[in-house]
Every structure is written in structure tokens, then in C-alpha cells.
Amino acid sequence: MTRNQETNSSSDGAEPSGIRQSSERTRAVLSNFAARDLSSPPAGRSDAVTAGDGSVSAATLQASDTYDPKASPAELARAGKFKDKTATRQESVLEIPDLNDKAEPKISVGMEDVTKQPPDKPHFVIKKNGDIEMFGDPEALKAKDIKIQLERNEGQLYPTEAQQAAAEKLVSYLSERLKSQNPALAKNGVELSDSDAVVSPEARQNAGVRQPQSSQMSPETQQSVGNMNRFKGNNGGEMPMGNTRDYFPNRDVPRQANESDQQAAVKDAAAGLFNPDKSEPYSTIRKSPEGDHRVGRYGFSGRQIHNWLSGLDLGDPPDPAKIEELIKQGKLPKGFNVDSLKKLQAMAQKMANGEAPSKDDMKLLPKEMQETMATDMVAQFKDRLGDNPGAIAAGMMSGKSASELTQEDLSSPTGKQLTDAGQRLYDIATARQQSEDGNDKLQWTQDGKVSIGNGKWLSGAAGQAFIAAQKDAAADGITIRVNSAGRTLEEQKYLYANRGTKGISRTVALPGRSNHESGNALDIANYQQAKPYLQKYGFVHGDGNGPISNDLVHFKYTGRNSSTRYA
């Protein structure tokens, strides 16, 4: 008998004592709330929309296209604005509030596959057609976290237009409702946790909600992270590559001569995280949550600008001849001089002090110079962090130089979110580079990885590269036979513990040290046939230092050089 069976069964068929006590407690709590709170209308309700018993007129509510914040959720349900499903929610899983909890109420929004049955249903479920079902009245339950769940099918990446409109309208209603009952929330705004970026920045602003206090991300970056979160948490799927264009700001500066595909993809990932103004990304000026200002396509901080300038060989005092040489090298823009340097240094200091640079100041940082700075910073962060695109993008978002970045910056909750989202953006940017037209598909698994068939997966960039190699090989009548690809840590532990047994090679890396765990490695049965196709798309035979004599089937993805061209 399983633990759940033990919990939900009894010898006489009666309700188990634990659940019975919980149900009785729940009924008592809800009955007490109903007697105390639902008998009188909220303060500030207008007599013009109330019936004789103090409730909002049903006719008034039914006629309105909005959710009147003067009406309670129960009243809106009676008026047909919400489908009342509270009777179907099991009392044993109802949220029982802690009456001693002094925390302010907040709102949480997220997407969830329709096939998943969470043990505790949310207060509101928004169907694909925009209908709202209320499974728990948050006011009757005295909920501290009002949960809104948008249903999605497997592989559905975005909410439907009807869902998003309904979610934004519901968040606005709940926010106004909470603020009318709580002076502190009316002053400071209601906290909205929206990990999947369902609610648009404009709707958040109109509703007067704020980010969680622990967040160190701007609303624009939070939106980008939420976009990437959607790739995880569902059961995988695919979409046209053309749909990814909104993840990245426009780049209208050609590649530099020494800029590799990998550098370009990391730069796009950093720009995607910063999420600058779409119309003029290179002219973006934005105040960060830390209080300083960030600018341009990549969100450079004043500290980063200052440190980059300090790393140039300018002379002390600045030497015009050296500045002219840097102009010839493409490091500095034409017309740059000692006076320009002083003005740019002053601008960087002003930004670090929390002052916004002017539009004239931004002329000191033309788009070509921004691209040069970003390329240099990617190289510096790579030297410090290794071949970790997500961490590099997160490091650039920190506002620090590579030498100043600490492990705590990346291991903090915000750092982890930025690293994960940065890696996903890098994977998509690499896939876009390899996409021949807008009809190519971007595929992902339930963990956000790229599926390569037969239940196997690789990381985004490696996965897209392998799919391209696979297509080329198939055109020549060759099937690349994959023995192994990406692995979880648990799978690596199993293989290591059983190495040398039937079907498992004696050559197995220690758990935590295998390229397979990062999704960048393949073991190919017909490695001699597959080798030219894999190498064409950025795989090396071995681990980067040549073939491995006792593991000749092993290939590692390292990316491709910008000089490489594909048919």
C-alpha cells in the first residue's frame, strides 16, 4: 500500500481522522470569516451601485465590462463574471490561513499544463477562451497569496490573447480591491509575482502593482526572464524560428572582423536580458533597481564604461597619438579626442551616482563603440567564468566588471534566474544563426532542452547544431547513430557506478565532471561517418584536445567560427 493509499483509506470506510479534523477546522474557520467579514460591504462602496442589503447590484455588475473593485469576488461570481467552482474544491486542501501572519497579501500569476494536477488548486483558473473559474474565494480564505493559474496545452508557450486580457483585468481588479482594504498597499502597491511574464509592463503599471521586494531586476528584464521561463515548466514543443525575433533588440551594426558567432550570440543574450527600448535600443537610458543608470543596447553601467576606458592604452596623461591609434584599430569612434574622453568619464561618474545622462551625453557612446565594448566585455567575462554563456550574460547585467564579479553575484536567487534566462537566450540566438529561413522550427523538451529524437536531448545551441548536422548527413544517405547525449547528474552517477558492466563503457567521467551533464556532448556509434558533418557544425572529436583514445565515440560541441558557412 502506498503512503497516499494509507492516508485516504480507513477500515470502516469513514473519513480518516486527520482529514476529518482538517475539514472541521476549515469549516469552522470559513464559517467564522463569513460571519465576520461577508455580512457588510467593504468600506468606501458607493450607494449608487448597491442593493438594499448592501451588496452590489447584480444588474450593475452584469452590465459592466470591467470588474468593479467595490464588488467582492463572491458578488462577481454571483453576477456571472467568474464561474464559481468553490464547491468542487476539496476542503482538505483548502488554504487555512495563519491568523498571526502579518505579511501583506500579494498576487501570483503563472502558467500550468492542463495535464498537471497540483495538490492545491489556485484561487483562479483562466481557461484558454478567457473564462475565469474561481476555486477559492481569496477574501473568504483570507489568502496571503492570491494565486492565478493560466491553463495551457503541452508545448503552448504563450497565453492566448483572451487569457492575457483576462489575467490583466483580474490582476487590476484584485489589486484595486486589496488597496481599498489596506492603506499600506494603497501607498506602496500590491506585490505581483509573475514568473512567466503573463502581465505586460504596461498592465502592471496601470494596475499599480510592484515587483517582489527581493527582485533586483527592472520590469523589462523581469519580462525577458519570464519569457524564458515559459520554455521550462511545460512538456516541450516547437515554434517557428521567426517567432523568436521579439526576444532580442535590433542590431544594426555589422559584425566586427574578429567577432565570432559565439561572441555574437552571447552579446545577443546580454542584450535580450537587458531588454532595451525596441525603437532605439542603442539610445536607451534606464534607472536600475540598484539606483544607478544603465544605457545602450547592452545596459552598460557607469562602472563598466569607466573600467573599459581604464583598460585601454590611453597614456597618462591621455596621449592624442595613442587615442588616434585606437581609432585606427576600431576601438574608439572617429573624432574621439582627449576632450571626448573627459566627457565620457564624467558621464560614467554621473551614471554611477544615479544621475541620468542626457541625449547629448549619449552621443559620446555611438552604437559602433557599444558593440566594441560589448565584445571586449564578453571576452573578459569568459576569461573569468569559462565557457558559460548564461553566466557571462548575467555577469554583464550585474553592472560590474569581470574582475569585480563574485560567486555570490551569480549564486543569488536573482543571479541564478539571470544565468538560466541568459543561457536560454544564448541557445535561441545560436539557433537563429543556424536557421536558414523563418520556417525552421525551434524545439525544446519539458526541461527547456532541445530534443534530438529517440528521447535524447542536448543543450539549445548544441541541439540545434546537431539537428543541422543530422539533416546534412541524411541528405547524403547517412544516419548518425547516437549512443548517448545529454544526461542528468543522476544518470551520470548510475553510469559511473556501473561502468564496465554489460552495455556500459569502462570510460565514464566522474559525476559532475562530464560534458554530457551540460548537454554539450555526444557519443556516436558510427563516429567516422558522422565526424565531417558534426565538425561542420561546431563539434570537435574528443573533448577539445583531440580524440580520446579509449573513447573515440565522444564529441563535444564548442560552437562554430564566424568564417564558417553552411550550404
Image (cartoon, grey):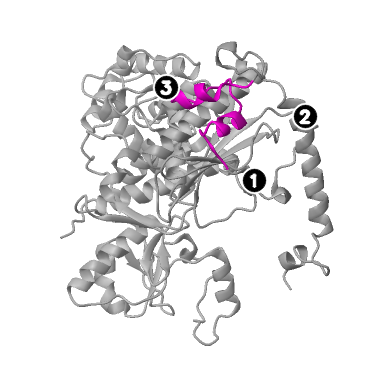
Which residue in the structure is indicated by mark 3?
286
Of the two numbered discs 3 and 2 on the same chain, state the one appearing first in sequence: 2
Q: Residues within 10 Å of mark 1 (few under 14, many from 20)?
A: few
Residue 384 can be seen, yes or no: no
- Placement of 494 over or under 187, stated as above or below: below
- Distance Cα–Cα, label 3 vs label 1: 48 Å
The extreme front residue here reads 52
Q: Secondary structure at mark 2?
A: helix
Which residue in the structure is indicated by mark 1?
87
The residue type indicated by label 3 comes to: Arg
| Residue sitting at x 44%, y 43% | 392
Q: Nearer the viewer, residue 91 or 359?
A: 91
Q: Residues within 10 Å of mark 2 (few under 14, many from 20)?
A: few
Q: Is residue 78 magenta?
A: yes
| Residue sitting at x 30%, y 12% | 360
| Residue 192 horizontal/vertical position (percent) | 56, 31
The part of the chain drawn in magenta is 55-84
Mark carried by residue 35: 2
| Residue 40 horizontal/vertical position (percent) | 71, 21
